[in-house]
Image (spheres, rainbow, N blue to C red):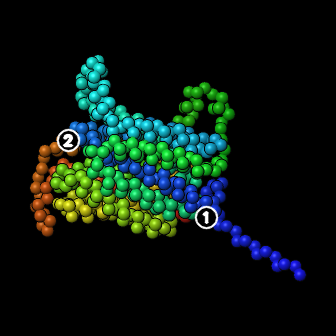
Amino acid sequence: MLPPPPRPTAPSVAYRAGTLVYSAAGLRAVFAWLLGAEIIFTLIDMLEPKVLPVLLKLHGATDTQIAIIVGSFNAVLQLVIMPPLGYYSDRLRTRWGRRIPVLFWATPFVALFLAVTPFAPEIASWLTRYERVGGWLSALPVTPVILVFAVLVVLYRSVQTMTNVCFFGLLRDVVPETHMGRFLALFRVFGAAGTFIITYWLLGLTATHSKPIFIGVALLNLVGFYALCWFVREGDYPPVARDPVIANASRGARLGAAVRTFVRESYRHPVYLWLYFTRVFLYGALLGLSGFIIFFPQYELGMNLAEVGQMLAWPALIWVVIAYPVGRLVDTRGAAHVLRLGLVMITAGYLLSFFLVVGPRTFLVSSIVTGVAFWIVMMAQLKLTQEVFHPQRYSQLAGANTVVQSILIALVISPACGGILDALKGWSHTLALPGVGDVVLGPYRFVNLMLGLCYGLALFGLNRVQHHVRLRGGPGNYVAPL
């Protein structure tokens, strides 16, 4: 008697991202490496708006100087680096992929310059020992220590911007579209974990332990991103069509052709232009303004820095609980729907905070409302770019967005904010509100109004994006222009 035939094994579920095919276990492994890298990425990204302003303030920087170093410098670096790197990365073809080679070479320099940043006072002191250098530094309108901080920030943000371009491009390339909303929700959960670490534990230690904080984050970055480069693999990409006439032309002619292609593909479609508009104000709020909100409770509500940091950390814990359901909502209803909810919430939250926050309890409520809304907004807007931008030009279009974004942040938003706060220094006015009591209006309270204005303008931009998406087929049938 013949033995019964073996039962056919059930095929393992396959998940696809371009030419990459994952089993369930393989997809979980990729998620794990990307999410681990996100914690480290967020730790570095949050050092600038959370820790660096406090560190600069401790060494005598003015609000205008803080705005320029934290906001304008970052915006200019993004303007200079992101567009050409995005264009180059989208067209790069190597055996290791198009994103990982850049991450591999940028990572050690990020770690080096980040680790050296808190040693700016020692470097400035060493430089001033030399008579000629010391005399030149003393003649400048900026103190030597602030100047050294500025140089070190430019160095580490230069290479960190390269990481930014290719890390987010890598997410778009290796995560299956069917799971992108849930992945980005988890992505922001792990980002919230990094923010919680910064605000709850590390912010209060800035004055006394800045060197261990920066060195520790730098070492984590070195290990974490090298592990990402080793364990995550990219798939194959379509070949890049090259014009033989341009390929044989001079270097100047090739550069001119590349610039014309970049401008033609990036700035002629209204749906892209309105998305750029929306993100200008989202990142204007984040990079140009949010660094000053820490001074509102510290200097105008009489709260200590450790207490403020712990209150600012609570939204990250709440986000951990609601992130996955919000991610599923993005997958089912679309990013624009969720982004609209988040923008309404955060705009109203900041406008009401201007009038209603009068002490620790009301500041905690404000922090929870605006903080949770912030995580919803930042997750949904990232997914919206992936829905609207063409997948083969994702990093290029993100770079084109950065050109507009950086110019406005560097030349308008950051300097205006810093200038207004310096002009209002020492000014105060008491406003009696029924049911609230006396509300003391000081310079840093106005940061709430500025943030509310930025998010309100982003909401207007989102309405225009949705209009142009409908013109190109609407949700589910949208065709991204090339």
Question: Looking at this view, is 452 or 460 the one in front?
Answer: 452
Question: Nearest the camera: 441 or 476?
Answer: 441
Image-based side of 2 in relation to 97, left or right? right
Q: Is residue 38 visible?
A: yes
Above or below: residue 422 compared with residue 313: above
The amino acid at mark 2 is Asp
Identify which residue, 482 or 107, lies in the foreground.
Answer: 107
Q: Is 445 positioned to the left or the right of 325 in the image?
A: left
Judged from the image, the secondary structure of the residue bearing numbered disc 1 is helix
Few, some or many C-alpha atoms within 10 Å of disc 1 (few <14, some 14-19, many ≥20)?
few
Q: Earlier in the sequence, mark 2 or mark 1?
A: 1
* Left or right of residue 179: residue 16: right
What residue is disc 2 on?
Answer: 422
The amino acid sitting under disc 1 is Ala
Task: List the single residue furthest toward the right.
Answer: 1
According to the picture, the residue beneath numbered tag 1 turns out to be 24
Q: Position of residue 82 (x, y in %)?
A: 47, 41
Count the labels in the image.
Answer: 2
Tell me which residue sits at (32%, 49%) in the image.
50
Residue under the image location 41 percent in, 67 percent down? 322
Residue at 25% from the left image edge and 62% from the top image edge: 364
Q: Is residue 164 left or right of residue 208?
A: right
Q: Label 2: state its secondary structure.
A: helix
The answer to whether any part of residue 285 appears in the image is no
Q: Residue 468, how many percent across, how many down?
A: 48, 57
Q: In this view, does 446 lie above or below 82?
A: below
Quadrant of residue 138 within the rendered picture: top left
Tag of residue 455: none
Q: Where is residue 180 in the image (x, y as percent from the top left)?
A: 53, 60
